[in-house]
Image (cartoon, helix red, strand yellow):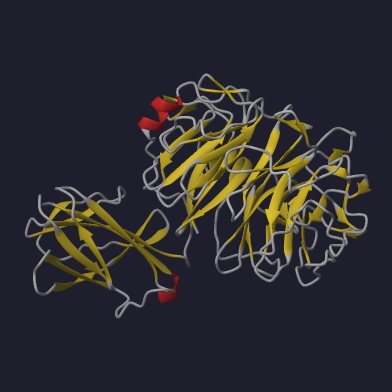
Amino acid sequence: MALSEINISLNIQNNRDYPQQINVMGNPANLLDTANATREFRYDVTTFTFTNENSVSIQYKLNGASSFNTFTAILPSKTIQGVLTVLNTLQIGYFNTYTQLGSTYISTYNNNYTFGAINIFSSTTTYGINPSFVSGTGFNGATFSSATPDYLYVAGFFSDYNGTAVFCISKIDANSGVIDTTFVTNSGTGFDNIVYATAIQSDGKILAVGAFADYNGNTANSIARINTDGTIDNTFVSGIGFDNPANYVLIQNDGKILVGGQFGSYNGTTSYGLIRLNTNGSVDATLNVGTGFLDNFSLAGGVDILALQSDGKIIVGGSFNLYNGSTYNGIIRLNSNGSIDSSFNIGVGFAPINDANLVRTIVVLNDGKILVGGNFTSYNGTTANRIIRLNANGSVDTSFVYGTGFNGTVRIIALQSNGQLLIGGDFSQYNGSSYNSIIRLNTNGSIDTSWIIGTGFVGSIRDIEIYFNTIFVTGGFSSFNGTPQGNISNLFI
């Protein structure tokens, strides 16, 4: 087991009614709450150095004490469900609870603390479903997700999560899978139709766009902003909203909101396919799209995905073939004011232009290169089956070798911190190899064969959210590697 491939998560609970202090591997924390207050510590050994691969250093003291007491927790190895798992038995005090697969490896010390060590996972062995995230029967309809450090917001077209009635949006504890009942109560009847995309603001509020007209009895034509407790945020005034569905929402660094879709107007202002809003929901007139986007049927919009560069330029993707009177098939880069960035030369762009899923996902890399996925089969005359990497000027990056590519639509590309790519969609093959709906690629386009996922998913993947050493996968699927999964799954990576 390589040291550089281990992640650790540790929960510590204060058992007393008075303040305590704890220091885990050099990270101090105050447990100032009353009894049962908890803190969680997460580590990746690429960031933290272990003096011994099989131990963790923990210190503790009462607040006001002159010094910490120190002990070393021993980490004996054990294999559970094909995943190499190191269980922290914390050999001090006495054992209070031990549950093999419930992540409750708990020991107490002097009745002051409870140390509950969750698993440590090695990324060199078979990967699978995280048993700590319990979704039960999951969702009864298609989903996608947005994650915060603590919660997962799942949206889509559903009315039930594991037996609880929820309508097209829900809030779930990202570690346990337990639904937030306060959010359920406050969201009430939720959305009356499908939510296509969400984005989380820096203050935690959730922007949702889609084909809906109502949120819990409030008029909300294709856009709404929701507070963290599930109530609607009435400080976001969208008026009569959009005249047709909005497909994607993206929050700029300055808090302004980009929305793309099939619409021709927003709250009475004409804007075909793309608009930028101020934080209060009013139109930001500094983005001028002219006659805007038209799709291949000469209808307004056709914008399915948006990406921002660090210089503020906007990359727009979808099934359109015209922008402000100029031919652009499937992709274009705009300056922040809406004018065309002519330095991004796409030639004839993507084909076939009559496909509604032409460009579905765009990722801007740190070096300025651009990954694009969708249902295209060529880019500017170059064969490219559903994936390609472009240079910053729009030319093909030939160092990304995809071979015969994918045999079905790529719907999402998620970028790991090490540059590897998690790709999901409707495919069953990549470059001649069988991979059902999900795959991990190296930075050069080759398959990462160390990520062993068995038979993969039965169904379609719409979204992938990276969450510490796991990923949340959402979409329209019924199982992963033979295990039933109701349109949501939490996998180790």
Residue at (75%, 46%) from the top-left corner?
Answer: 408
* Residue at the left extreme of this rendering: 110
Which quadrant of the structure image shows residue 163? top left
Relative placement, left or right, of 365 versus 188 is right
| Foreground residue among 392 and 98 | 392
Q: Where is residue 448 in the image (x, y as percent from the top left)?
A: 61, 65
Relative placement, left or right, of 96 versus 480 is left
Q: Where is residue 428 in the image (x, y as percent from the top left)?
A: 69, 48
Q: Position of residue 115 (x, y in %)?
A: 20, 58
The quadrant of the picture occupied by the N terminus is bottom left
- Does the rendering let one see residue 477? no
Q: Where is residue 5 in the image (x, y as percent from the top left)?
A: 45, 70
Relative placement, left or right, of 381 versus 124 is right
* Residue at the top extreme of this rendering: 217
| Foreground residue among 190 and 25 | 190
Residue at (59%, 56%) from the top-left corner?
Answer: 253
| Foreground residue among 182 and 423 | 182
